[in-house]
Image (cartoon, rainbow, N blue to C red):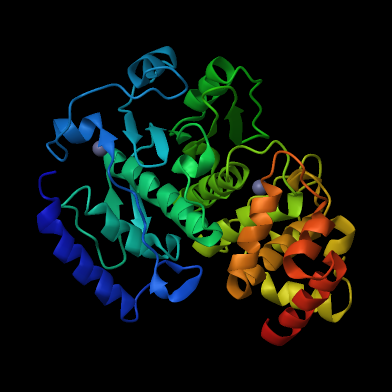
């Protein structure tokens, strides 16, 4: 792998500089004073071989069981496309080049530095950098693997692909019409503008999860696109923990999706809701103040009353925000027990109710767990 050896000391130096007061990078969820190892290599990419960034035997990557060149042809994609395989993801991207600003996300600067491991001559600017279409596809490789590495460390999951049968798949399109063709032809689903992201579990021997969207659907640019993709990556990682589970507890699933999205940026929050509009008060910005106010006035519905809901779509807007806060609290104060709760949630057979699982893991019922969380909010928010 030409060039990587030379790039590593530079990247480490830059990371050290960032650590000394610059943007925050990932820390280990079970040991916050330790950096989190993020495994986004080795990777395979035909374009990297052509550009002598990678030495490997050329081969085609299959995306939804279809080799990438055939997929591009059948979707009538006229722009350059990229297909990447990394430790836990396969990515098909037609995203265009874009400017990435350090303030797009807490981790943007550190991710751009990681990109140097793949593109040794890539320059990281003081405020941000322009990335080519090829580099942007690899940036999503880094981001997706980073979320998965964090979740893996949080839950102590050691399985290949977290226990799924194959890699998670991201199909990221620049244009809506490419995404529409993909949804209709490859996913065999009706296309609707009201559904800007498609998530699909591929069953049977393959057993993998796919997420797809198009950049042109987002007014908030790269920051909103990235937050939305990582929100859905988090849902998929939760559903794929220890093998695919057909039904999760909505608060845990939704709470994790908002947790991973809001760590990146608080400005773009995606709400998986079936019929209701997203809650205006929680569309962007600081949720803590609003949640503290709710708790102070005793207006927070207890988790005990809604923890059994099966899907995140069944939560109200307020419950989405509370689920985020409860998951965030548990990650920060009790990651090992949260991991145990995830293990129980991911049981396909003999799974207890959520309130029984909470009792088993935390030694209190869901109403009492909620009261502990309330005390934390009143003290810390
Ligand atoms: Zn490449
Ligand atoms: Zn969601």
Is residue 202 found left or right of 365 in the rendered image?
A: left
* Figure check: 6 above or below 313: below
Q: Quadrant of residue 97?
A: top left
- Residue 117 coordinates in the image, percent (x, y): 22, 53
Is residue 308 found left or right of 75 in the rendered image?
A: right
Q: Could you tell me which residue is drawn at 80 percent across and 51 percent down?
A: 315
Q: Quadrant of the N terminus?
A: top left
Is residue 211 found left or right of 95 in the rendered image?
A: right
Q: Could you tell me which residue is drawn at 37 percent across and 44 percent down?
A: 141
Residue 192 appearing in the image: yes
Q: Quadrant of residue 321?
A: bottom right
Q: Quadrant of residue 240?
A: top right
Q: Could you tell me which residue is drawn at 88 percent across and 79 percent down?
A: 297
* Figure check: 281 above or below 353: below
* Figure check: 218 above or below 300: above
Q: Quadrant of the C terminus?
A: bottom right
């Amino acid at each position: 792998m030409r060039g990587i050896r030379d790039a590593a000391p530079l990247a480490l130096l830059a990371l050290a500089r960032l650590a000394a007061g610059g943007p925050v990078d990932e820390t280990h969820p079970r040991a916050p004073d330790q950096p989190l190892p993020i495994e986004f290599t080795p990777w395979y990419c035909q374009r990297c071989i052509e550009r002598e960034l990678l030495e490997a035997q050329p081969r085609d990557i299959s995306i939804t069981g279809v080799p990438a060149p055939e997929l591009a042809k059948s979707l009538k994609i006229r722009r350059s496309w990229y297909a990447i395989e990394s430790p836990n993801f396969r990515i098909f991207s037609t995203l265009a080049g874009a400017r990435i600003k350090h303030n797009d996300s807490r981790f943007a600067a550190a991710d751009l530095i990681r990109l140097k491991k793949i593109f040794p001559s890539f320059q990281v600017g003081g405020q941000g950098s322009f990335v080519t279409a090829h580099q942007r596809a690899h940036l999503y490789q880094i981001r997706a693997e980073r979320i998965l590495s964090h979740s893996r460390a949080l839950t102590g999951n050691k399985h290949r692909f977290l226990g799924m049968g194959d890699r998670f798949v991201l199909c990221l399109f620049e244009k809506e019409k490419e995404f529409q063709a993909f949804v209709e032809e490859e996913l065999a689903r009706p296309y609707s503008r009201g559904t800007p992201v498609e998530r699909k579990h591929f069953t049977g021997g393959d057993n993998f999860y796919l997420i797809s969207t198009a950049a042109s659907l987002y007014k908030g640019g790269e920051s909103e696109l990235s937050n939305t993709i990582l929100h859905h990556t988090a849902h998929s990682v939760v559903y794929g923990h220890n093998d695919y589970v057909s039904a999760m507890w909505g608060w845990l699933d939704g709470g994790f999706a908002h947790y991973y999205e809001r760590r990146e940026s608080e400005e773009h929050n995606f709400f998986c809701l079936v019929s209701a509009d997203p809650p205006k008060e929680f569309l962007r910005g600081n949720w803590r103040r609003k949640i503290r106010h709710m708790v102070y006035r005793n207006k927070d519905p207890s988790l005990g009353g809604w923890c059994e809901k099966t899907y995140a779509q069944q939560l109200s807007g307020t419950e989405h925000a509370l689920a985020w806060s409860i998951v965030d609290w548990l990650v920060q104060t009790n990651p090992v027990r949260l991991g145990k709760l995830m293990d129980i949630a991911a049981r396909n057979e003999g799974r207890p109710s959520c309130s029984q699982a909470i009792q088993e893991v935390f030694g209190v019922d869901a109403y009492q767990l909620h009261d502990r969380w309330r005390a934390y909010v009143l003290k810390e928010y």
